[in-house]
Amino acid sequence: MGRTDQLESLSTLLQLEREARQADSVSALAFLMVNGSHALTPYRQACLWQADSHGSGRIIAFSGQENHDPDAPFPLWMNRLLTRLHQQHDVDFRPMTAQDLAADDATAWEEWLPPHALWIVLKSPEGHRLGGLFLARDHPWTAANEPLLSHLVESYGHAWNALTLRRKRLFTWPVDRFRAGRRILLFVAVVGTLMIPVHQSTLAPASVTAVEPTIVRSAMDGVVDEILVEPNQRVEVGTPLLRLDDRTLANRLAVTHRILEASRTELRQLEQTLLTHGSSHEPLIRLEGRIQQTLVERDHLRALLERIEIRAERSGVVIMDRQESWQGRPVVTGQRILMIADPSDTEISITLPLENAIPLPDAAPVTLHLSSDPSRSHAGRLRYRGFQPVVQPEGFAAYPLKARFVDHTSRPRLGLRGTVTIQGEKIPLFYYLFRRPVSAFRRLTGF
């Protein structure tokens, strides 16, 4: 090696040492070790292995890669190989080839690595083994490579140890900075702060609903022929709401009229026969009975036809699904079709998810934040609490709650949705902060 090459190598060594001292994290230093060292001595592959306190370790960097999959076949094999090299404790600067390994490892070496490699142990200034740098290339490593590399890895070990200690100090309580009295005061202050009583609160979805809406049900079995009103339409008492299909009833009524007419004709003929021949009155009695039964059926069908059209029994606004979803749909007696509600008499309907449930006092304060107007809030008081959770259409279980508005003069419009904040009882700040983690821990462990 000429004098110019020596000066260039020394310059490269000093530059690498300077970059190692300026590294601000272990990952940055690891990147420099496996990639920047190539400027001092050429190689094809490099990896950095970090030791742990149990005699094993892990690969934290490969040359030419920012991230690697530790479960891939090559990293797994390399980790086993470097763990064995670390556990041998023979030399700190070890050139090696595939012939130095067992048959299985030699086969894997020939598949993944160049013929020649160099294992260099990285140590702290106190002599603790931090890990090792593994370099592989196509031509052999010689003793001429050892002086510069040994000096470089010594600088690497010093920088690595300093970064590791700095990271540990971030998570170490600086006991030496406080005297006993200050520590006690700090402890008392923390405990006292955690015992400050605060109001427990929870969030839940909510909507503005009518207080006591009138439910309009089907008066009989049938098919909805036409919805005569629209959602949110204002109606008065007696306003036609919907009409059921009357064709089946009309056909039955027409058949009943024909049967009744034929029976009366038969009755007149039978009466004339009795006058002329004086036969038994028993057929006459049976026929009159059938006529009476037919009359009852006719009156029943007429009454049903009068209920084909359903009218409003109170004034208010119509609450229902889209009209198209009801037209032509079969209904049964008593089935709910729509509701009529007073738009000025509203309340808050709350769906409290099971995982958000907290103990709630009577008349607990409620604050409604509407999605359509999040800048405003509406205060309320809890008036009803469901004691059994109900499975919602979305698939989660929730407690049904009802709350009345405090300000009766500015209630929001019927049908609006939003989120409510429900204020519970006072609890210590510690419980307020750690209720969810403790609950999750209990679910996982069973304690």
Image: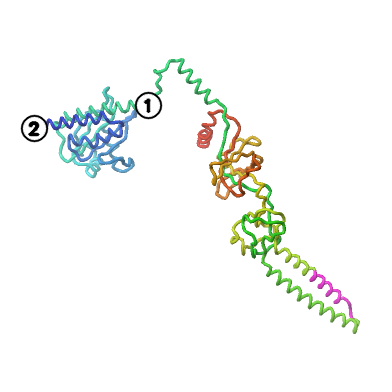
Q: Secondary structure at mark 2?
A: loop
The one nearer the camera, 420 or 410, is 410
- Between marks 1 and 2, how big is the CA–CA gap? 47 Å
Q: Residues within 10 Å of mark 1 (few under 14, many from 20)?
A: few
Residue 315 position, x and y percent, is 70, 54
Q: Indicate the colouring scheme.
A: rainbow
Residue 135 position, x and y percent, is 21, 36
Q: Secondary structure at mark 1?
A: helix
Q: Point out which mark residue 170 bears.
A: 1
Residue range (magenta)? 279-295
Identity, as a three-letter code, of the amino acid under mark 1: Leu
In the image, residue 175 above or below residue 429: above
In the image, residue 149 above or below residue 326: above
Instruction: Name the residue furthest bottom.
Output: 276
Residue on which the image places disc 2 = 2
The part of the image, by quadrant, that contains residue 365 is top right
**Quick one: label 1 or label 2, which is nearer the N terminus?**
2
Query: Main SS type for the magenta part?
Result: helix
Residue at horizontal 26 percent and vertical 26 percent from the top: 158
The part of the image, by quadrant, that contains residue 177 is top left
Instruction: Name the residue furthest left.
Output: 2
Is 122 on the left or on the right of 404, as rendered?
left
